[in-house]
Image (spheres, rainbow, N blue to C red):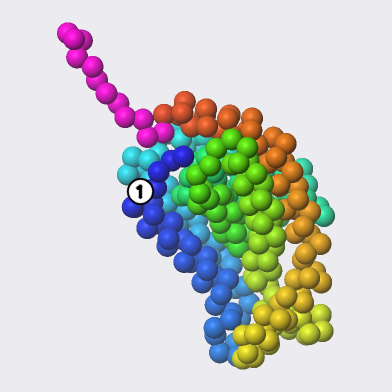
Amino acid sequence: MISLRWPGAVALLLVTLVGVASFGWPFVVAPGTGLAHGQDAPWLFAALLGLLALVLLAEVSAGGLDPRTVAVLGVLAATGGALRVLSAGTAGLEPMFFLLVLAGRVLGRSTGFVLGALAVLTGAFLTGGVGPWLPFQMVSAGWVALGAALLPPATGRAERVMLAAYGLAAGLLYGAVMNLWFWPFMGASAPTGAGFVPGAEVTSNLGHYAAFYLATSLGWDVPRGLLTAALVLVAGRPVLATLRRAVRRAAFDAEVIFEDPDR
């Protein structure tokens, strides 16, 4: 796994804070504020691309990434985008998450986050799925890969079982988080008793959101989580070995030592 250096850590923290703010601001503004993500999404998209570039530049300047690393990252992002084309989210089945979990585990926190965001961006361009939801999908997918990198150390079957369990949980959490980009703005179009009520008690809105999630999102998120877990269990071993071999051949963090020819 690529170690996280402080410039990359600061950049990753900054992009995470921006992501949390982008999802959470509708819940803290004054009731009646009539803004919608259709207006702020382009700004968030531009800010997110800039912050992703900042994460990469921070890692490159700190010596954590070299051109070969960036090349591997590009190949994996293209592969993730291609996997998304296979399903485009049909019935919640998205094999791309299998790659995000395993690659995030191998590449580490900052590089894994960038991979998640770029894979979604690539898939959106390939499928024509570009819209105000895209920057939120990029942030959420980046968090999926980041979470895999934050899991405790493990090896062998224990690691694959842990990653499969995480893949199942990540499939559910991805849907739960992604709903927040539009749920506060549904207004009267939300199911009865499942809409966001500005100014209401937090517990009341949590209950409304739980009802909304069970009624609309759970049926899509469970297949995503189960498919991710199954693919990790079935193909996790060879894919992890391949990714780790690619990391070693790319000489991540390799220390160059010049030997004395007279010795």
From the image, which quarter does the C terminus lie in? top left
Which residues lie in the magenta part? 252-263
Q: SS of the residue at dot 1?
A: loop
Quadrant of the rendered structure where residue 79 is? top right
* Residue 156 picture location, percent across and down: 59, 35
- Does the magenta portion include 257? yes
> Which residue sits at x=52%, y=27%?
245
> Which residue sits at x=68%, y=41%?
232
- Horizontally, residue 117 falls left or right of residue 84, namely left
Secondary structure mostly taken by the magenta-highlighted segment of the chain: loop
Q: Amino acid at mark 1?
A: Arg
How many circles with numbers are drawn on the protein? 1
User: Is 2 above or below relative to 92?
Assistant: above
- Does the magenta portion include 135? no
Q: Residue furthest top?
A: 262
User: Is 92 above or below relative to 37?
Assistant: above
Q: Residue furthest front?
A: 158
